[in-house]
Image (cartoon, grey):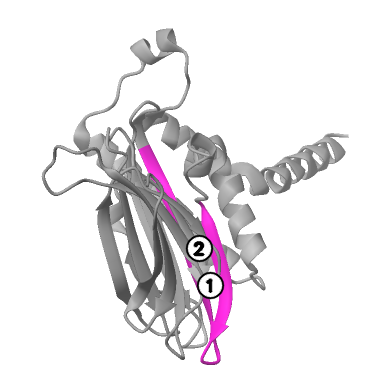
Amino acid sequence: MNKYLGLLIFLSLGLLRLQGQGTTDAQRYRAKSGEIFFHSADSEQANRFALPARAGIENAVGGLHDLVQISIETALKDNPTSDSIESMLRNLQGEVSLNSIYPEWSNIPFADVANINGTQVLASAFAVLSGGIGIPEIRPYVQFYSKASGTWMLVAEVGTEFAGTAFSMNAVRSAVPGELWYLVWGRAIGDTGARLKMSLYALDGRQTRTVWQRENIRGGTVEVSHDEITLDYFEPMADGIAPPRHLRETLRPGQTGLETFKTEYLDQ
Protein backbone atom coordinates (compact mmCIF):
# COMPACT_ATOMS: atom_id res chain seq x y z
CA MET A 1 0.00 0.00 0.00
CA ASN A 2 2.82 2.40 0.87
CA LYS A 3 4.44 1.66 -2.50
CA TYR A 4 1.26 2.58 -4.36
CA LEU A 5 0.73 5.65 -2.19
CA GLY A 6 4.26 6.81 -2.97
CA LEU A 7 3.70 6.27 -6.69
CA LEU A 8 0.45 8.26 -6.52
CA ILE A 9 2.19 11.14 -4.77
CA PHE A 10 5.03 11.07 -7.32
CA LEU A 11 2.61 11.14 -10.28
CA SER A 12 0.56 13.92 -8.68
CA LEU A 13 3.62 16.09 -8.15
CA GLY A 14 4.70 15.48 -11.73
CA LEU A 15 1.26 16.51 -13.01
CA LEU A 16 1.36 19.69 -10.95
CA ARG A 17 4.77 20.55 -12.36
CA LEU A 18 3.52 20.04 -15.92
CA GLN A 19 0.44 22.14 -15.28
CA GLY A 20 2.57 24.91 -13.81
CA GLN A 21 5.13 25.09 -16.62
CA GLY A 22 3.00 27.38 -18.77
CA THR A 23 2.43 29.95 -16.04
CA THR A 24 5.69 29.90 -14.13
CA ASP A 25 7.39 32.65 -16.13
CA ALA A 26 4.27 34.85 -16.07
CA GLN A 27 3.96 34.41 -12.31
CA ARG A 28 7.63 35.21 -11.84
CA TYR A 29 7.37 38.29 -14.05
CA ARG A 30 4.34 39.72 -12.30
CA ALA A 31 5.68 38.99 -8.83
CA LYS A 32 8.98 40.73 -9.57
CA SER A 33 7.21 43.60 -11.34
CA GLY A 34 5.00 44.06 -8.29
CA GLU A 35 8.08 44.89 -6.24
CA ILE A 36 8.92 47.96 -8.35
CA PHE A 37 5.69 49.02 -10.08
CA PHE A 38 2.35 49.95 -8.51
CA HIS A 39 -0.40 49.81 -11.12
CA SER A 40 -3.54 50.13 -9.01
CA ALA A 41 -5.73 53.26 -8.93
CA ASP A 42 -6.38 52.69 -5.21
CA SER A 43 -4.83 55.76 -3.54
CA GLU A 44 -4.82 54.17 -0.08
CA GLN A 45 -2.84 51.20 -1.33
CA ALA A 46 -0.55 53.53 -3.28
CA ASN A 47 0.34 55.36 -0.07
CA ARG A 48 1.49 52.07 1.43
CA PHE A 49 3.54 51.08 -1.63
CA ALA A 50 7.27 51.64 -1.07
CA LEU A 51 9.86 51.39 -3.83
CA PRO A 52 13.16 49.70 -3.05
CA ALA A 53 16.40 51.66 -3.26
CA ARG A 54 17.65 52.63 -6.73
CA ALA A 55 20.07 49.70 -6.87
CA GLY A 56 17.20 47.34 -6.10
CA ILE A 57 15.05 48.88 -8.84
CA GLU A 58 17.86 48.55 -11.39
CA ASN A 59 18.43 44.91 -10.43
CA ALA A 60 14.72 44.15 -10.75
CA VAL A 61 14.45 45.92 -14.12
CA GLY A 62 17.46 43.95 -15.38
CA GLY A 63 15.96 40.71 -14.14
CA LEU A 64 12.63 41.42 -15.85
CA HIS A 65 14.41 42.35 -19.08
CA ASP A 66 16.37 39.11 -18.97
CA LEU A 67 13.24 37.06 -18.29
CA VAL A 68 11.54 38.54 -21.36
CA GLN A 69 14.60 37.97 -23.53
CA ILE A 70 14.96 34.36 -22.41
CA SER A 71 11.27 33.81 -23.12
CA ILE A 72 11.68 35.23 -26.64
CA GLU A 73 14.75 33.09 -27.32
CA THR A 74 12.90 29.99 -26.10
CA ALA A 75 9.84 30.76 -28.24
CA LEU A 76 12.03 31.28 -31.32
CA LYS A 77 13.07 27.62 -31.22
CA ASP A 78 9.54 26.42 -31.98
CA ASN A 79 8.44 27.50 -35.50
CA PRO A 80 7.81 31.12 -34.49
CA THR A 81 5.21 33.40 -36.03
CA SER A 82 4.46 37.04 -35.34
CA ASP A 83 1.28 36.06 -33.52
CA SER A 84 2.92 33.35 -31.41
CA ILE A 85 5.73 35.62 -30.20
CA GLU A 86 3.43 38.57 -29.53
CA SER A 87 0.90 36.39 -27.69
CA MET A 88 3.69 34.94 -25.55
CA LEU A 89 4.86 38.45 -24.62
CA ARG A 90 1.35 39.62 -23.77
CA ASN A 91 0.71 36.54 -21.64
CA LEU A 92 4.07 36.96 -19.91
CA GLN A 93 3.60 40.63 -18.97
CA GLY A 94 -0.18 40.59 -18.55
CA GLU A 95 -1.63 43.67 -16.90
CA VAL A 96 1.79 45.29 -16.52
CA SER A 97 2.51 45.49 -20.26
CA LEU A 98 2.72 48.99 -21.74
CA ASN A 99 -0.37 48.38 -23.90
CA SER A 100 -2.40 47.37 -20.84
CA ILE A 101 -1.47 50.58 -19.02
CA TYR A 102 -1.76 52.92 -22.06
CA PRO A 103 -3.98 51.12 -24.60
CA GLU A 104 -4.73 54.33 -26.49
CA TRP A 105 -1.06 55.26 -26.98
CA SER A 106 0.89 52.01 -27.22
CA ASN A 107 0.77 48.66 -29.02
CA ILE A 108 3.72 47.27 -27.05
CA PRO A 109 4.61 44.41 -26.77
CA PHE A 110 5.12 44.00 -30.50
CA ALA A 111 6.56 41.18 -32.62
CA ASP A 112 7.08 40.70 -36.35
CA VAL A 113 8.64 37.55 -37.78
CA ALA A 114 9.76 38.08 -41.39
CA ASN A 115 12.26 37.02 -44.05
CA ILE A 116 14.85 39.26 -45.68
CA ASN A 117 17.71 38.27 -47.99
CA GLY A 118 16.93 34.60 -47.38
CA THR A 119 17.17 35.00 -43.60
CA GLN A 120 14.42 34.64 -41.03
CA VAL A 121 14.34 37.57 -38.58
CA LEU A 122 12.32 38.90 -35.67
CA ALA A 123 11.67 42.53 -34.77
CA SER A 124 10.26 42.87 -31.27
CA ALA A 125 9.65 45.47 -28.60
CA PHE A 126 8.68 45.47 -24.94
CA ALA A 127 8.89 47.76 -21.93
CA VAL A 128 9.66 47.30 -18.24
CA LEU A 129 7.85 49.66 -15.88
CA SER A 130 8.70 50.88 -12.39
CA GLY A 131 7.29 53.51 -10.03
CA GLY A 132 3.60 54.38 -10.01
CA ILE A 133 0.88 54.31 -12.62
CA GLY A 134 0.56 58.14 -12.74
CA ILE A 135 3.97 58.85 -14.29
CA PRO A 136 5.84 55.55 -14.39
CA GLU A 137 9.46 55.06 -15.30
CA ILE A 138 9.35 53.30 -18.66
CA ARG A 139 12.36 51.33 -19.93
CA PRO A 140 11.97 50.62 -23.66
CA TYR A 141 13.63 47.72 -25.45
CA VAL A 142 13.54 47.25 -29.22
CA GLN A 143 15.26 44.01 -30.21
CA PHE A 144 16.20 42.51 -33.56
CA TYR A 145 16.96 38.79 -33.89
CA SER A 146 18.37 36.91 -36.88
CA LYS A 147 18.78 33.29 -37.93
CA ALA A 148 21.54 34.12 -40.43
CA SER A 149 24.03 31.78 -38.73
CA GLY A 150 21.56 28.89 -38.57
CA THR A 151 20.54 29.60 -34.99
CA TRP A 152 18.59 32.53 -33.61
CA MET A 153 20.80 35.34 -32.29
CA LEU A 154 20.10 38.81 -30.90
CA VAL A 155 21.82 41.20 -33.32
CA ALA A 156 20.79 44.54 -31.81
CA GLU A 157 18.93 46.13 -28.92
CA VAL A 158 18.01 49.80 -29.43
CA GLY A 159 15.33 52.28 -28.43
CA THR A 160 16.79 53.99 -25.36
CA GLU A 161 15.62 57.34 -26.78
CA PHE A 162 12.04 56.27 -25.97
CA ALA A 163 12.61 56.09 -22.22
CA GLY A 164 9.65 57.61 -20.41
CA THR A 165 7.33 57.38 -23.41
CA ALA A 166 4.25 55.33 -24.25
CA PHE A 167 5.75 54.05 -27.49
CA SER A 168 4.58 51.91 -30.41
CA MET A 169 6.22 50.01 -33.24
CA ASN A 170 5.11 49.02 -36.72
CA ALA A 171 6.58 47.78 -39.98
CA VAL A 172 6.55 50.24 -42.88
CA ARG A 173 7.50 49.87 -46.51
CA SER A 174 11.24 49.98 -47.06
CA ALA A 175 12.54 52.30 -49.77
CA VAL A 176 15.90 50.47 -49.81
CA PRO A 177 16.10 47.00 -51.42
CA GLY A 178 17.29 44.27 -49.06
CA GLU A 179 16.10 46.01 -45.89
CA LEU A 180 13.08 45.79 -43.62
CA TRP A 181 12.02 49.08 -42.06
CA TYR A 182 10.36 49.55 -38.67
CA LEU A 183 9.00 52.81 -37.30
CA VAL A 184 8.99 53.41 -33.54
CA TRP A 185 7.26 56.44 -32.07
CA GLY A 186 6.59 57.51 -28.49
CA ARG A 187 4.71 60.14 -26.54
CA ALA A 188 6.31 61.46 -23.35
CA ILE A 189 4.31 60.63 -20.21
CA GLY A 190 3.82 63.56 -17.86
CA ASP A 191 4.98 66.12 -20.44
CA THR A 192 2.50 69.02 -20.68
CA GLY A 193 3.50 69.52 -24.30
CA ALA A 194 2.78 65.85 -25.06
CA ARG A 195 5.91 65.83 -27.20
CA LEU A 196 6.44 63.00 -29.64
CA LYS A 197 9.60 61.44 -31.01
CA MET A 198 10.10 59.02 -33.90
CA SER A 199 12.87 56.68 -35.08
CA LEU A 200 13.05 54.54 -38.21
CA TYR A 201 15.23 51.41 -38.03
CA ALA A 202 16.42 49.14 -40.84
CA LEU A 203 17.24 45.42 -40.63
CA ASP A 204 18.98 43.50 -43.42
CA GLY A 205 19.13 40.11 -41.72
CA ARG A 206 22.55 40.57 -40.15
CA GLN A 207 22.68 44.10 -38.75
CA THR A 208 20.55 47.15 -38.06
CA ARG A 209 20.91 50.86 -38.68
CA THR A 210 18.98 53.98 -37.73
CA VAL A 211 17.63 55.43 -40.98
CA TRP A 212 15.84 58.56 -39.75
CA GLN A 213 14.85 60.34 -36.53
CA ARG A 214 12.64 63.23 -35.48
CA GLU A 215 11.80 64.60 -32.01
CA ASN A 216 10.16 67.39 -30.00
CA ILE A 217 6.93 67.15 -32.00
CA ARG A 218 4.45 69.10 -29.87
CA GLY A 219 1.07 67.49 -29.24
CA GLY A 220 1.87 64.88 -31.86
CA THR A 221 -0.24 61.90 -32.83
CA VAL A 222 0.68 59.31 -35.45
CA GLU A 223 -1.29 57.07 -37.79
CA VAL A 224 0.76 54.40 -39.54
CA SER A 225 0.03 52.27 -42.58
CA HIS A 226 2.47 50.24 -44.62
CA ASP A 227 2.97 52.99 -47.21
CA GLU A 228 2.06 56.22 -45.43
CA ILE A 229 2.41 57.94 -42.05
CA THR A 230 0.10 60.77 -40.98
CA LEU A 231 1.54 63.12 -38.36
CA ASP A 232 -0.82 65.54 -36.59
CA TYR A 233 0.87 68.18 -34.38
CA PHE A 234 1.20 71.83 -33.33
CA GLU A 235 4.05 73.99 -34.59
CA PRO A 236 5.02 77.01 -32.43
CA MET A 237 5.30 80.33 -34.26
CA ALA A 238 8.75 81.88 -34.55
CA ASP A 239 7.92 84.91 -32.39
CA GLY A 240 6.42 82.76 -29.64
CA ILE A 241 3.45 85.15 -29.34
CA ALA A 242 0.93 83.87 -31.86
CA PRO A 243 -0.82 80.59 -31.08
CA PRO A 244 0.85 77.49 -32.53
CA ARG A 245 -0.27 76.30 -35.95
CA HIS A 246 -2.13 73.00 -36.23
CA LEU A 247 -0.53 70.86 -38.93
CA ARG A 248 -1.21 67.52 -40.56
CA GLU A 249 1.82 66.16 -42.35
CA THR A 250 1.80 63.13 -44.62
CA LEU A 251 5.08 61.20 -44.80
CA ARG A 252 6.12 58.44 -47.15
CA PRO A 253 9.19 56.18 -47.20
CA GLY A 254 12.02 57.56 -49.33
CA GLN A 255 15.75 57.07 -49.77
CA THR A 256 16.55 59.32 -46.79
CA GLY A 257 13.90 57.84 -44.51
CA LEU A 258 10.42 59.30 -44.09
CA GLU A 259 9.96 62.21 -46.48
CA THR A 260 7.22 64.85 -46.39
CA PHE A 261 4.65 64.23 -49.13
CA LYS A 262 2.02 66.79 -48.10
CA THR A 263 1.45 69.37 -45.36
CA GLU A 264 -1.95 70.81 -44.40
CA TYR A 265 -2.61 73.70 -42.00
CA LEU A 266 -5.80 72.73 -40.19
CA ASP A 267 -6.44 76.07 -38.47
CA GLN A 268 -6.60 78.19 -41.61
Is the N terminus in the top left, top right, bottom left or bottom right quadrant? top right
Residue for point 56% across, 52% down: 89
Q: Is residue 212 above or below residue 193?
A: below
Q: Say which amino acid is labelled 1.
A: Asp
Mark 2 is surrounded, within 10 Å at the Cα level, by few (under 14), some (14 to 19) or many (20 or more) other residues, namely many
Magenta stretch, residue numbers:
109-129
Residue for point 57% across, 40% down: 94
Q: Say which amino acid is labelled 2.
A: Asn
Which of the pair 136/183 is nearer the observer? 183
Left or right: where 116 falls relative to 237: right
Image mark count: 2
Residue 94 is marked as none
Residue 186 is situated, as x and y percent measured from the top left of the image, at 37, 50
Q: Is residue 53 above or below residue 66?
A: above
Is residue 7 visible to us here? yes
Which of the pair 247/268 is nearer the observer? 268
Residue on which disc 2 sits: 170
Residue on which disc 1 sits: 227
Secondary structure at badge 2 equals strand
Secondary structure at badge 1 equals loop
Dominant secondary structure (helix, strand or loop) of the stretch shown in magenta: strand
